[in-house]
Image: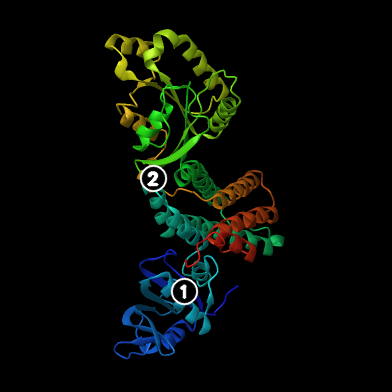
Amino acid sequence: MISHDSIVALATPSGAGAIAVIRISGDDAITIGNTVFKSIKNKNLTNQKTHTLHLGHIIDDNKTLDEVLVSIFKGPNSYTGENTIEISCHGSTYIQQQIIQLLLRKGCRMADPGEFTLRAFLNGKLDLSQAEAVADLISSDNEASHQIAMQQMRGGFSNEIAKLREELLNFASLIELELDFAEEDVEFADRTQFHELLNRIEFVLKRLIDSFAVGNVIKNGIPVAIVGEPNVGKSTLLNALLNEERAIVSEIAGTTRDTIEDELVIGGIGFRFIDTAGIRETEDVVESIGIRKTFEKIEQAQVVVFLFDSSEFKVSGLKLKVELEKIKNQFPLKPLLIIGNKADKLEETEIQNIKLEIPEILLISAKEKLGVEDLKNQLLSFVNTGALRNNETIVTNTRHYDSLLKALEEIQKVKFGLETNLSSDLMALDIKEALYQFGMITGQVTNDELLGNIFANFCIGK
């Protein structure tokens, strides 16, 4: 899969801008760049030092295309591990295309999605989990997902896995050695130390697997369904949370016929709010479809915000409790926030009565934006950010999660074999499978199909 031809792509977003960066990587990258670049000081790029900048013009025959700045990175001290140059030109789409087409005529080919990072992996500049973190870093849209991607790109996760793999590999070597001397019936691997190692690996694997629950919601955002009867202020609350008029607000009950979704970052964590159609008995066909969708969204949500009109509590308090029990019984495992809206209309005695009836209630006024910050803090409390604050390794990648589960299964098999005096040759098979799963994470074990699937999701130019 290793290729040494020179590839070219736009490294900055497509479209017009102040500047654009065109990247070339490959054995002949600097030579090709030199054929189209004329330095203002008549420098030859092939003779220049690595990590230097050069001002000049891109020339197509006798035609000047643009004044540019060229950066030189000589392999192996470059992102890809190969000779690389980056041309910073003016951001006109016409200029970008003219320069790329010129480079294609001079011997480059267009890069495939993620091919620069793929070459970095193949040339040993990154392991596979670090390469995947590059894509996560590019797509991170909040502080938490950015922090996790940076930690993984620096090798936090792969270092932890590599350490476990190395220790297990040492014992695997001793087990294999025992097989070579099977007739002498000798033990090279200390069974007590081996048992301690397996316990330690099992503990680390379980911690990493458990972290996926947090990592997955941080990476993809936490879906929060806002539900309740019509006209209790669900759309007003969504607008207050987002601080913009995202949903239509009306005195007419049943205005929201479909779900409305938008995202908000609270304390560095992404939340996806879903404003749903009001739950009530209705003969309106369109509204009933919206209500059915509401229950589908509750099923998908990780947190449910149940909103009701607190100013109507005297009249509808009993009905409210029935609705709450219905949702609790239907979705017993989902965190439920009970929010009383329109609290600005309440007397102090009414507030006390509601709190006596429903102790866990949070009273707000979405219209006046009172208590909205308290609601945000409550939502944040549902996310276990302890591991994030302590800079622990958090798994966000489904492929890694799958390999960790399989590795844990194999380690538990080895542990059972050790406790039941299973023969070394059978234990060796389970150890090899565990090592294989560790290698799948870091890329020590891989295949073209796996790499193709991973890097196909990258943007071209990275």
Indicate the position of residue 241 as horizontal and vertical percent values: 36, 34
Compared with 230, 55 (above or below) is: below
Q: Nearer the viewer, residue 279 or 143?
A: 279
Is disc 1 placed on a helix, strand or loop?
helix
Q: Which mark is residue 259?
A: none
Identified by mark 1, the residue type is Gln
Q: Nearer the viewer, residue 168 or 64?
A: 64
Q: Nearer the viewer, residue 403 or 221?
A: 221
Left-right relation of 138 to 52: right
Single out the residue that lies furthest toward the left: 348
Residue shown at the point (50%, 59%) measured from the top left: 132
Query: Which residue was labeled with disc 1?
Result: 97
Circle 1 Cα neighbour tier, 10 Å, few/some/many (<14 / 14–19 / ≥20): few
Indicate the position of residue 65 as horizontal and vertical percent values: 39, 81
Circle 2 Cα neighbour tier, 10 Å, few/some/many (<14 / 14–19 / ≥20): some
* Measured Cα–Cα span from mark 2 to mark 1: 43 Å
Q: Nearer the viewer, mark 2 or mark 1?
A: 1
